[in-house]
Amino acid sequence: MQSLFIDRRRLLQAGALAGTGLLLPGCTTLVARPTARGLASRPTTRAGCLPPVNVAPERVIRTLAGLRPYRAPGFRVEAEAFGDKKVVHNYGHGGAGITLSWGTSRLATLLGLQGHQGPVAVLGAGVMGLSTARLVQEAGFPVTIYAKALPPETTSNIAGGQFHPFGHYDGERVTDAWRAQLSAALDYSWRRFQIMVGDDYGIRWLPTYAERDTPERQLLPTFPPNSRLLRPDEHPFPVQSLARYDTMYVEVGRYLRQLIRDVELAGGRIAIRELATPAEVAALPERLVFNCTGLGARALFGDEELRPARGQLAILLPQPEIQYAFTGNAGYMFPRADGILLGGTFELDQWDATPQPETIAGIIASHQRLFAGFRCT
Ligand SMILES: Cc1cc2nc3c(=O)[nH]c(=O)nc-3n(C[C@H](O)[C@H](O)[C@H](O)COP(=O)(O)OP(=O)(O)OC[C@H]3O[C@@H](n4cnc5c(N)ncnc54)[C@H](O)[C@@H]3O)c2cc1C
């Protein structure tokens, strides 16, 4: 049987999307589910116990679908001359846009602000536009954000909010120069999110259990911390092998709301406006423009490398006692104050951003099986 679900860790380990056999164009991701046979009867010591998530269709409080801005050659952070203006692109982050937001926005502002004088325009008010606008303000420039839609009506609001760079490039298409950008971006983001942990921004640390047979690959000297393989008596999950590590989780609704407040408190202006053509961008009064339009950059700047990768989520009633996250063949489970997120699809070239009832039912069923198989309850 084939599954729609992805393992965020497994795709990352592969270092690529295409070429792994995990993605099919115009179709869903295919990953075989593991069998839990042979593990269910082995009791777990109390030390390895965790409270299970209570998964049932009647506990679903909302369903969501969003389109990740996937680009096989990786995110685009690049400056382009545009008549008398400079446009700096900062888009195409796939399933890693929250994670990379501070980092690629910093690279973009370093490219754009050097030698610049005067006001600055930012196109887009998702996580990338808001982070870029804050960095522009921190560097001392006045900023206006032009956006077709504001949070909560952005893709960034759909994100699960895990800090981990997942599903955002094809390893066979990226250059060494791009990999250097990725390392620099990840490093800056990792440090920036750490100093924002707390209720104001809705960011917290959680242990994450990842179905896999090796610890996480160290992407930075300090990320991910505390990564190791677990023995079966150290966890209750009915899976063949499991690793754990620690990372941060962002409650994106609260986070984006706070970023908007930060932009406004620092004197930023926000204009609801769709830029339909490059000529409209050229007519803006600002001479420096950051393009943070996510998937919108495909139509606005004609970037056909940009493709949607749909992700669907079922949100369950909150369960405050769940203080861990899971990623694996069943999909992923991220606990947040606004509900327990169950997700895990990565459907390339699907443009319809509405939840599909059959897929949602599959997400619920796979997690129901996972938590029903807990070996200590
Ligand atoms: C189901 C799902 C789960 C995810 N989970 C995670 C996760 O756990 N961790 C993680 O790091 N990432 C995750 N992501 C990925 C993340 O959500 C995206 O990479 C990120 O939101 C992209 O941000 P953005 O600001 O570039 O785009 P968006 O949030 O789409 O913002 C684009 C902005 O540009 C505006 N715009 C577009 N076109 C125009 C135009 N022509 N004129 C004016 N304005 C325009 C839009 O209105 C919007 O304001 C997930 C995504 C999905 C769908």
Image (cartoon, grey):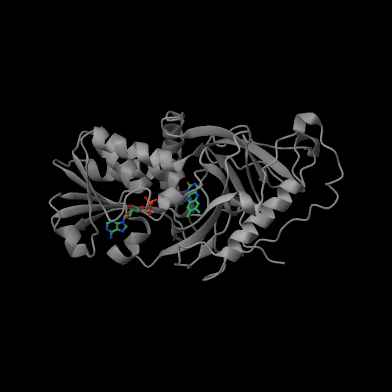
Can residue 180 be seen by looking at this rendering?
Answer: no
| Residue 19 in the figure: left or right of residue 261 | right
Q: Position of residue 41 (x, y in %)?
A: 87, 45
| Residue 365 in the figure: left or right of residue 234 | left
| Residue 274 in the figure: left or right of residue 213 | left
Q: How many marks?
A: 0
Q: Residue at x 62, y 37 (%)?
A: 324
Q: Position of residue 7 (x, y in %)?
A: 62, 53
| Residue 363 in the figure: left or right of residue 349 | right
- Position of the N terminus, as image quadrant, is bottom right
- Position of the C terminus, as image quadrant, is top right
Identify the image quadrant of residue 270: top left
Q: Position of residue 291 (x, y in %)?
A: 28, 53
Q: Nearer the viewer, residue 60 or 12?
A: 60
Q: Residue at x 53, y 70 (%)?
A: 25
Relative to 166, is 276 above or below? Answer: below
